[in-house]
Every structure is written in structure tokens, then in C-alpha cells.
Image (spheres, coloured by chain):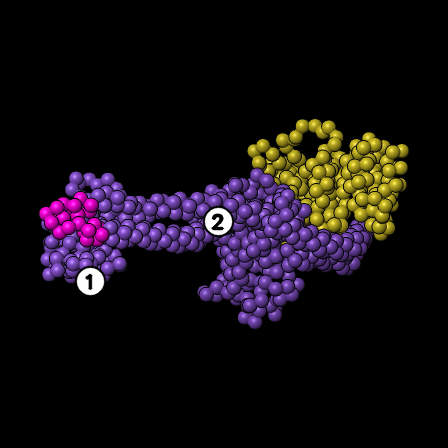
Amino acid sequence: MSSKSDRPVMHSAAWRISLWATLAFACGTLLVFVFIERFVAHDIQRRSDAWLSGEVETLGDVAERTPNDALYDRVVSEVAELASKEVPNRQPSESPANDTVFFLQTGRDGTLKLWVGDGDGRANLKAIQATRVVSGRPTDIRVPGFAIPFRVATDSMNDGTRIYLGLSERDEQRVLLKLRGSFFFMWLSLVLLGFFIVFYTTRRTLSHVREITEAASRIGHSDLNARVPTSKRHDEMGHLALTLNRMLDRIEISMHQLHTITDSLAHDLRSPLTAIRGKLETSLSVVRDAEYTDSIVSAIDELDRLTDFLNKSLDVAEAKADALRLTPTEIDLDELLRAMTDLYEPSMSERGLHVNLLSEGSLTILADAGLIHRMIANLFDNELKHLTSGCTVTVNLRAVGSSASLILRDDGKGFDQEIQSQLLERRVKGKNSSGHGLGLAFVDAVVRAHGGTVEASNAARGGAQISILLPIAREGMMRGHGQVSATSA
Amino acid sequence: MRLLLVEDEHDIQTFLKQALADAGYQVDVAPDGKTAEALATSTAYDILIVDLGLPDVDGITLILCLRHIGVHAPVLILSARRSVDDRVRGLEQGGDDYLTKPFALAELLARLRNLLKRNSPGGGEATRLRVLDLELDLLRREATRSGQPLQLTPQEFVLLEYLCRNAGRVVTRSMILDKVWGMRIQPDTNVVDVHIYRLRGKVDGNGQQPLIRTLRGVGYVIKER
């Protein structure tokens, strides 16, 4: 499909929807993960606190029961060493020295009495003393020289001494870090997966919408019997397609009615016109009297004008209802304008008018040849009828973007000021105009039916100016002409 | 030339029958599809004129039906409709022609002649055309009158060629616009007249016998008289 390639993915609705949905999903899952992480962290803390409290109690018991002799230090440090082996969440340490756990006993005077652990324990004691550590409630202690804080539990002995058991939070933090890492990867893959799922499904759904849009835009004036594709599923897209098709049915019916009306009107008027014209022509071949001939000839002329007026009126009426029937063929505007200038030049110079054609070369449009020919002839007729001797008409043809720009400019009197704003309306004509006031309305109708625009104004330097923009035929459009519909402006 | 006119409108029937008879056709008239079918099966016609809006049957259906039963004469379709039906286009491609109402008699006659010419094995294309002392060399695109070369623009040559090809027959303004400029338009100004006027100035300019004549209300004709 063409629109897939010429529109970047980033500009599609599917992309936007997926982005927003993913953002919401990411925030939601992040909240959930943060909550779980908090919960787990709290649980780990609780478990290590329980261990600390239990151990400090055991150690207290041991310290109290052990007689305060030479062996006391050894027994207590053995037990403390042993306890440090049962640390929860223990990770094998890189350093041989035991830096995860320390045991510390202070004397009655608060001096260091017994130390089990890495280093001499002075810094630890200092840090403990700087913080108030109460029995039964483990507290975080930051020891200078250690990046990671210790969790310290305490218990007071009956003999007035105090024991402290410290547990480094390194392992706990390592566990949490690992948890966070895996949570992050889980979250990321969930979000990415979510994004792709949302993007894929919305893209699929929206591709139906795009198909419907493309089909609907293809179905223009002349191709009204086509319908947008319907899916078998009875979802919103199916309903949309069905509703559009029902709407197209109704439009087709009313357009058909309009065509029937204009056709029968044309038929009912043309048949008598044919008969009258035929009779006039027959009598013309019989009558020899110049006086009668003149009246018959002018009657035939009037009849032809009436026929032309009828045709244009019906064309304008159909175009106003977006129901003009077109048979598009390739038309080279440059070639057509040259032929048209060639055709009108003698009449123009006869009336003292000059005509200049400035064209940048071949410009092909896909349009109904009959209508475009009549439209351009109309423009030239207008100039021929309304300009006074000595004026110049400049016809300018060039490509502007994807449109063919046709500008007809003259240096005459320009349009009447009073009708300036409604030049393209039916029955609007200047005070001195002898026409039906259909000319520019017809031009507008034809150009609009081909997806173009018309602007009529008085140029700044004086004189009338009519600018027409018509879409240039693209390669793709050329292939299937006959079915190509003009899109309305 | 035997011609079958299938037309239900009485007024059109009358004047067409008269005009066609004047042009040398032997005309039978059928007011509806049934009569047309009966006539076409019993008589061999050289050409048919069929109006699309018949009381009993659609004109195109009638033509297809006639083709089916072996009537192969060319058909000139008359239509008062605004749009040209796809089926009409199909017939047009098959060698038939159509004309929208109202029409000029001269155009109707010209189209009939064209249809008959298309269906008869004619000789090769002429390379020279001659009308009295006016001579056209179609290969070198040069025209002479009484041996004197005429200074014509390419467009004027095409116009003169078209008139000479139809020498003795009237051509209307819209026929000229169609064949010479390739446009089916109806200008409400005298554009064609000015072209003819200029051409006449060159062809009939030197006090020679006027060749290009205006038939007021009808069109133009180049005549050898």
C-alpha cells in the first residue's frame, strides 16, 4: 500500500496510541515493582533484625554464664565467630577477614572490653557511642572506614557491661541490588513487549480504518457504485464500513435521482428544440427572401445559445451537488491553450485585442475533455466580449507544486466593483454584460469538479484576473482512467 | 441509399424524413422498437438512425438486438441525454456514431456520409485535392489557386483541406471546430467566422470567382459553381 511507504511510522496514530499506552503501562508496572521491592527490603530487614536480636540474646546468655576469667574472652569470641557464620543472606566474601559481623563488649565505664571482628574496633565503638543504641531495637550505624553501614543490636548484662553485635548491611544490599536489577530487566521487557503488542494490534486495527479511508476517497463522483471493504468481524470497524456503505447507498440514490431529473429535463427540452431547429433549417433552405432568412438565421442562433445555456445550467446544477459526471482523459493543457489561442487570435486581433501565451511547456491533467474545452473557450469568449480595443490578454500556464496554474489576465476595466465578491455565483453579471451570468459559475463548477480552485479578482495594476489551479495527473492516476474519480475541492 | 429512421417524436420524424429525402436517402420510419425490428429484418438497410429514448425499448438494447439478429448496417445514434452512456461509447468504438440533440442538419448528413464511407471499401487516400482551379497538395501541404501559390498558415491549410474534402456539402461551425481544432465547443462569439473570413481573403482574394460561400444560419460550403 502506497500510504505505508510515503508516511513515516512515527506520524501514524498507531505509534501515538502505543506510546501513550506504553507510558501508562510502564508507570503502572513501575509502581507495582517499587511496592514489591519495598516489601521485600522490609522483610529482609525484619529477618536480619530478628537474627541480630536472637544472636545478641544468645551471646548475652553465654557472656553472663561464662565466668569472667581468662577463658571468657575466648569463649565469647568463639561463639561470636560461630554466629557470624550463620548470617542471613550471606554471600561468600572476597576478603578472608570477617568484615560482615563484629562483636563488641564494653565495660561498665564504656571502654572497649572485648572485640571480635575486623580491625581493632575503636572506630566501631566510637560510632556506637555517637548514636544511641537501645536494647531490643537494632539501629543503623555508620562506621568511618566502611562504606556500608552496620546494623547493630545491643543488650546490657547484669554486671553492667554491654554487648553489641553488628551486622554489615552489605549482603542485604547486595540481595536488594540483585533484586532491583532483575526487576528492572523484567520491567523493561514487560514494557517493550507491551509496546509491541499494543503497536501491532492498533496498527492492524487502524490499517482497516486506512483501507476504508482510501476506498472512501477513491469513491468520488463518477465511481459511486464502489463500496468500502467490509470485514467479516462484527466489531467497530465492521460497523464503520457498513455505515459508510449505507451512507454511500443513500448518496448514490439521491445522485441517481438528480441525474434522472436533469436528464429528463434535458430530454424534455431538447426534443422540442431539435424539432424547432430542424424546422427552421428546413424553411431556411426553401425561403429565398433575405428578410425572412435574417429572422430565421437569428432564430437558429438564439436556439443554439439557448441550448448552450441549458447545458451549462444543468452542468452547474450538477456540479453544485457534486454530481457532475466526468469521463477523464489525459489532456495536455499547453497543447490545448495553444490551439485555443490559435482559434481565438484572429477574432481578437479583429477587435484590436492582443493575446499572449506564456507557457512553461507540456502539462498533463486528467480531466473530462469536453468540459475543459468548453471551460477554457468560455474564458476566451469572456475576454473577447468584454474587452475594449487595445487591450492585451495574457495567458500564463505553469506548474505550481502538484497543480497546473492557469492565469488569464487582461488590462481592461476589470470586474464591476459591486459584484466582486460573488463573481463565481450563478446569475451574477456586470451591469453592461449581455450574457446569462453563467460563464464564471460554469468555469468554477468545472474546475471544482476536477478538484481544482478558481479565483477571480481585479489585479492590483487594474484589469481582470482569473487564476485556476488544477491537479496535475500523476503516473498512478494515468493507468486506470475511466474509473478515476475527481475529488472535490 | 436505404435508411431506417427510428424516432418516436412526431415533429422530429417529419422534418428529418423530409431533410433526408432531400439529401437523396430512401427513408423508412419506425416510431418504436418493435416496428424497427420488424422492418430491419424484412428490408436490407444501408444505414440506421436510432433515437435512444424510444417508448417501448431502450435504443441501445434495440441496436444490440438488431446486431444479434444479423443487421450490420452502421448506426447513427441520436441522444437527448446529457451524459454519454458507456454502452454508447462501446458502440462508437464498434464503428457507430452518436449525435446529441439538438443538432444541425448539415452535421447529421456529414456523420451519415462518414459512417457510410467507413463501411465501404474506399480507394486509397488521395494525395491531391482539387476544387475547380484550387489545388491542394496534401503531402507538401501547399495550396495553389490558378497555379498561384497561396500563403496559408498550417491551420488555414487544415481548414481549407476540410472544406475541400467536403466540397459541395455544407459544414457547420461546430463541425469545423471539432475536425480542425479538435474541440467540441459552442463558442458564443464569431471565432470560426473570422478564420473563414481570413481564409477567404487568401483563396478568393484576387477578384477570382468566390469559392467559399457562407450559408447563413447553417455553415459554410466550398462550391464549384
Output the chain of dot 1. A
Q: Is residue A208 left or right of residue A69?
A: right
Q: Amino acid at mark 2?
A: Ala
* Residue A478 belongs to the span the image colors magenta: no
Instruction: From the top left corner, tell me how far across and down residue A179 is, in percent.
Output: 33, 46
Q: Colour of chain B?
A: yellow
Q: Is residue A243 visible?
A: yes
Horizontal arrangement in the rendering, residue A97 relative to residue A418 (left or right): left
Chain identifier of the residue bearing label 2 in the image: A
Q: Is residue B184 visible?
A: no
Give the extent of the magenta segment. A59-80
Residue drawn 19% across the image and 51% down it? A65
**Taking A80 as reference, is A222 left or right?**
right
Instruction: Pick the residue in front: A404 or A475.
Output: A475
Report x, y in % for residue A193.
44, 44
Q: Which chain is purple?
A: A
Q: Give the SS element for disc 2.
A: helix
Q: Indicate which disc residue A132 carries.
A: 1
To which quarter of the image does residue A293 belong? Answer: bottom right
Q: Is residue A63 covered in magenta?
A: yes
**In front of the other: label 1 or label 2?**
1
Give the numbered dot on residue A14: 2
